[in-house]
Amino acid sequence: MRFRVLPILLVTLALALMAQADRTDSQLTSCTFNLKNIAAALERYATEHEGEFPKSLSALTPEYLKSIPKCPAAGKDTYSASYHPDKAEVCYRLCCSGDHHARAGLKANQPAYDGKEGLGPKSALGRIQQAAKNTPSVWTTACKSNLLSIATALERYSTDNQGRYPVALSALTPKYLRRIPSCPAAGADSYSASYQMSSNPDAFTLCCQGSHHRKVGYPPNHPAYTSVNGLIQK
């Protein structure tokens, strides 16, 4: 009997380790999404404040964020204390403060986000990307957030331009968006090529072009957004 117990124990241990690894990856991916969501809110704030970022993240709530999110690994807000706009308040840096993702192979105060460079640091990007592959649903949520940010910028552009939308998304930068965001699943801007503007009537459509979200059941070129119907998920 004792010879049968050992393989069972090994299988149980292996399953426990796999579950822990999945949880670690999910926590890292969710934390990364939190950073990107805060960054999107900061960009929206800057759009409405002559390009300047707030002195603290608390200025984002509740208009731009319902609340400052919590890092799932830490169980608390690890971002507010790390936030630093530069002296002219035209850029910013923030990170997950502490050593909460050591199990995922990251150093203290990682992952991080820089207003100019984006998600980083470079030494952590490989691990972050690998974690993302194991939790693709989080990146789909981030992609939908990108679409909403672009749509918001398009509406602001329209307000300033007699109800007309731009011919290309590039017209949004840097006044309405500091940059066109990248779909985290694609690792690139998957939106600009999909954008179409109609002048009769004034309307637009855009989507995440490609099949980057097939792992979570999305068809090609989804999620999508139209000025008439809003966010189209599936």
Image (cartoon, helix red, strand yellow):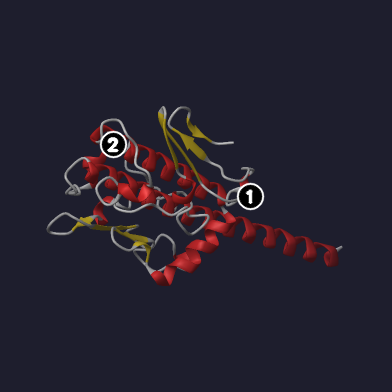
**Circle 1 crowding by C-alpha within 10 Å: few under 14, some 14–19, many from 20:** few
Label 2's element? Answer: helix
Task: Judge left or right: residue 94 versus residue 205.
Answer: left
Type of residue at label 2? Arg
Report the quarter where the N terminus lies.
Answer: bottom right
Residue 57 or residue 7, whichever sits in front: 57
Q: Residue drawn 80% across and 62% down? A: 5
Which residue is at the far bottom?
A: 123
Q: Position of residue 137 (x, y in %)?
A: 55, 47
User: In the picture provided, is 152 more to the left or to the right than 195?
Assistant: left
Pointer 2 with pointer 1, Cβ within 8 A: no
Local packing at callout 2 (Cα closer than 10 Å; few below 14, some 14-19, many 20+) is: some
The mark closer to the camera, 2 or 1, is 2
Mark 1 falls on what kind of element?
helix
Residue 156 tag number: 2
Across and down, in percent, residue 14 comes to: 68, 62
Q: Position of residue 225 (x, y in %)?
A: 47, 36
Residue with the mark numbered 1: 215
Q: Amino acid at mark 1?
A: Lys
Residue found farthest to the left: 87
Q: Nearer the viewer, residue 153 or 122?
A: 153
The spot of residue 214 in percent (x, y) is 63, 48
